[in-house]
Image (cartoon, helix red, strand yellow):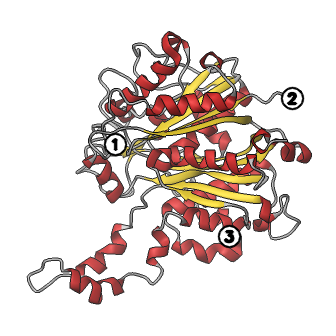
Amino acid sequence: MKRTERRVVISGLGPITPVGVGIDAMWEKSCSGGSAISRIESFDASGFRSRHGGGITKDLFNVRDAVPKSYRKATKVMARDTEFAVGGAAAAIADAGLITKAAGDGVPTIAPDRMGCHIGAGLIAADVDELTMALARSVDDDGEFDYATWGEQGMSNLTPLWLLKYLPNMLACHVTIIHDCQGPSNTITCAESSATLSIGESMRVIQRNAADVCLTGGCDSKLNPMALLRQQFAQRLAASGDDDATAHESVRPYAHDADGTLVGEGGGIIVLESLESARERGVSAYAEVTGFGAAQSDCPDTVGMQFAEDDPGLESAIRQALRAAGLEPDGIDAIVPGGTGIPAVDAADRRGMKAVFGDRLVDIPLILPVPVYGLCGAGIGAISICLAAKAIEQQRLPARINAASIEGLDAAAAEARDADLRSILVFTTNLGGQSAAVVLSRIEEDS
């Protein structure tokens, strides 16, 4: 057998979203319609263009419930992004029916050296309250910030392990320690494409027989002052107004009057597993990961807020994924695109899809998670893939929140409905120009 012939399936889903932890809560919300976006309560966002987002409340998730008692002390040095990864991993492992070191007893289902971990992360924003004292002690006699004073005494007001809390690789670090993943491990930080790229890497690790199982995906939190400020400076935020009940309507992917996006927090961890391993365990997988592709787009502004109109980046990523899956464009039954509501990014999405699918594009239904959960940065690709995998398992398209009509796309508001879903394309484009695409397919049990 050639190493590229090893088949990879999704055996566990662990999304963490504003409706809670786990695929059941997310799928129910996605099919029932409505949005989980609400007013930002974790800090005063009154000075920002948008004052709403997809927040995860304390009553829905506490990281201490997701770790062994012996590991609870370590949660004190976890950033919020890391907490989500730990919670998502616990949910995904439970959903896959796996036993790991975290259980405390019993033989692990998968040998530790055959279990990898690849998790996408964003630019983790430091907690403003933690920085306040350090910055206050770093001013000169005129009350101005002074770098020398910062080095001499300001930094001493930070906790000794402060840096370890905010390194992007801490998501995978804590997950691998808790579950004793001794196989290949990596962290990818490519904004909204982080999770999609990580899932592609896990797929290839399993294909080349370097692991039998990988924990993969991505998590992020954009609901803090520093992260939200970055999005505002990048001119990506929609004006959500003051009406909490209708704030989510400001996110209108692919609409002619789209104004921007609303951010969120969360993401998810997914269990990828070789098909033979899943069958040996006697578990039913959600879908097979049949294709992956990635490309870099040309961004004339150099930072990825604008994509060149003739750039073939996204088209290339999609075509790579289709080719790896052995599919022609007419083999795709639904698409989970970026669908951010950011006009420039949505325009790049539309151009890429049109280049690949041509006139058929208008007849391919789109699944749009961002108006429901917010744009969760490095975690949005994981949410999208969780939705696609569940849709294939259920043979059902979730409800869609959007404008009443969208020209040239099957992307307008719609109720959940049954559908014949053989293969679904998921892709993400990011702030920076990186595109990644994954194809999920229904598992043919006789092959």
Q: Nearer the viewer, mark 1 or mark 3?
A: 1
**Considering the numbered disc 3 on the image, is that residue within a helix, a strand or a loop?**
helix
Residue that numbered label 3 is attached to:
177
Please name whichever residue, 291 or 18, is drawn nearer the observer in this view of the structure.
291
Dot 1 crowding, Cα within 10 Å, few <14, some 14–19, many 20+: many
**Considering the numbered disc 2 on the image, is that residue within a helix, a strand or a loop?**
loop
Q: Nearer the viewer, mark 2 or mark 3?
A: 2
- Where residue 152 sits in the image (x, y, percent)? 27, 89
Determine contact: label 1, label 3, CB under 8 Å: no
Name which of mark 1 and mark 3 comes first in the sequence. 3
Please name whichever residue, 194 or 56, is drawn nearer the observer in this view of the structure.
194
Name which of mark 2 and mark 1 comes first in the sequence. 1
Q: Quadrant of the N terminus?
A: top right
Residue that numbered label 1 is attached to:
304
- Where residue 33 sits in the image (x, y, percent)? 53, 28
- Up-down: is 296 above or below 422? below
Examine the rendering and report whether any part of residue 195 can be seen.
yes
Name which of mark 2 and mark 3 comes first in the sequence. 3
**Considering the numbered disc 1 on the image, is that residue within a helix, a strand or a loop?**
loop
Dot 2 crowding, Cα within 10 Å, few <14, some 14–19, many 20+: few
Residue at 67% from the left image edge and 65% from the top image edge: 176
Tell me the amino acid under the disc marked 3. Ile
- Where residue 63 sits in the image (x, y, percent)? 59, 63
CA gap, disc 1 to disc 3? Answer: 35 Å
Q: Is residue 356 left or right of residue 91?
A: left
Please name whichever residue, 8 or 404, is drawn nearer the observer in this view of the structure.
8
Q: Is residue 306 left or right of residue 116?
A: left
Examine the rendering and report whether any part of residue 34 can be seen.
no
- Up-down: is 319 above or below 264? above
Residue that numbered label 2 is attached to:
447
CA gap, disc 2 to disc 1? Answer: 42 Å
Tell me the amino acid under the disc marked 2. Ser
